[in-house]
């Protein structure tokens, strides 16, 4: 795994919207931070799998927060379940407020990958004036999960009765990257949880539609990045969302031959370098 510089990573907790304790990783740069970046991880994952991203942003001078989302990672409640994605959105909002308290005067940005990209869009739709911009990379705005039409119908029915039995989330880890080490790391990670309840799944399907509807209301700066060879999400749906964004300050970047999790693939450095360049160009109004 790539390491960009010796950095200070800390583990702590922060209170979610309902007071629940949520696990949090932070990376501190060697100098005074330029801004704050909050990382939102993908489906079944946790903040530790974003370590290469957190390290890179910190090496470039940004203070990084990366939570384990409700239902994943160090979550002590039921894994793979929420009653509503609003819970996750409000948890992120509490973290944004914490970041602003701990780094008063600095710009705050939210960065989301895959499912985290979907969560980021939902957060922005509800709280866009709380942050200074957002970045989504290969966002879950159009999925290719291996779930048949029959299974999807069954999940919708089970969601109505809120049966809390986890099912496979349909994510094929062999397709996430061309880098064998990334695939192996995900497959062998003991904290991955690639299952979800019917309620979680149907919330996800409905949230994709909600996210696309919200594009016309989102007006803050945005960077949207998409790997052209992504086999997990639908690149055309990402571009559709970008085209419908109301923001006058939006940037599109696409990457040939890269897969869903490109950060450690050959050529994947461009994804993070473009993100840092965009962040540095949006450091405005800091005191």
Image (spheres, helix red, strand yellow):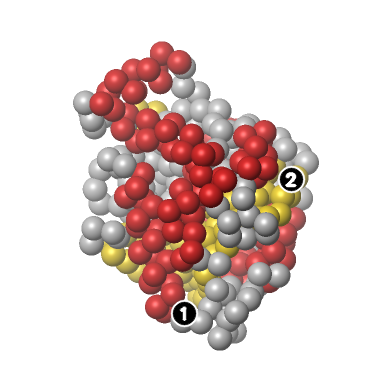
Q: Name the residue under label 2.
A: 254
Query: Is 263 situated above or below 170?
Result: below
Q: Bin the neighbour count of mark 2 within 10 Å (Cα to Cα): few under 14, some 14-19, many 20 and up.
A: some
Image point (21%, 26%), residue name: 161
In the image: residue 254, left or right of residue 156? right
Residue 184 in view, yes or no: no
- Quadrant containing the C terminus is bottom right
In the image: residue 62, left or right of residue 265? left
- Quadrant containing the N terminus is bottom right
Image point (49%, 59%), residue name: 128
Looking at marks 1 and 2 on the same chain, the residue that comes earlier in the sequence is marked by 1
Q: Residue 76 carries which label?
A: none
Residue 42 is situated, as x and y percent measured from the top left of the image, at 49, 46
Query: Between residues 128 and 13, which one lies in front from this camera angle?
Result: 128
Image point (55%, 73%), residue name: 107
Q: Distance between the residues labelled 1 and 2?
A: 32 Å
Q: Residue 103 carries which label?
A: 1
Q: Quadrant of residue 284?
A: bottom right
Residue 210 is situated, as x and y percent measured from the top left of the image, at 46, 39
Residue 262 is situated, as x and y percent measured from the top left of the image, at 66, 47
Residue 256 is situated, as x and y percent measured from the top left of the image, at 78, 41
Q: Quadrant of residue 274?
A: bottom right
């Amino acid at each position: 795994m790539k390491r960009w510089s010796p950095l200070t990573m800390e583990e702590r907790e922060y209170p979610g919207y309902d007071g629940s304790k949520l696990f949090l990783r932070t990376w501190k740069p060697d100098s005074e931070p330029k801004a704050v970046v909050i990382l939102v991880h993908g489906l079944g994952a946790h903040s530790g799998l974003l370590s290469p991203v957190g390290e890179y942003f910190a090496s470039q001078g940004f203070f990084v927060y990366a939570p384990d989302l409700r239902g994943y990672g160090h979550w002590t409640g039921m894994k793979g379940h929420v009653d509503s994605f609003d819970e996750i959105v409000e948890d992120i909002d509490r973290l944004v407020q914490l970041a602003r308290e701990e780094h008063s005067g600095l710009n705050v940005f939210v960065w989301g990958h895959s499912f985290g990209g979907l969560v980021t869009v939902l957060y922005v739709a509800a709280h866009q004036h709380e942050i200074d911009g957002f970045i989504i990379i290969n966002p879950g705005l159009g999925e290719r999960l291996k779930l048949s039409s029959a299974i999807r119908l069954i999940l919708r029915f089970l969601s109505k009765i809120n049966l809390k039995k986890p099912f496979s989330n349909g994510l094929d880890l062999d397709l996430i990257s061309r880098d064998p080490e990334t695939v192996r790391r995900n497959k062998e990670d003991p904290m991955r949880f690639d299952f979800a309840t019917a309620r979680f799944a149907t919330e996800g399907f409905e949230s994709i539609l909600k996210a696309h509807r919200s594009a016309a209301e989102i007006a803050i700066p945005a960077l949207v990045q998409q790997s052209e060879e992504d086999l997990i999400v639908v690149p055309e749906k990402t571009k559709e969302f970008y085209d419908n964004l109301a923001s006058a300050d939006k940037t599109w970047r696409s990457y040939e031959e890269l897969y869903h999790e490109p950060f450690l693939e050959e050529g994947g450095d461009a994804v993070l370098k473009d993100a840092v360049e965009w962040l540095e160009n949006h450091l405005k109004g800091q005191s």
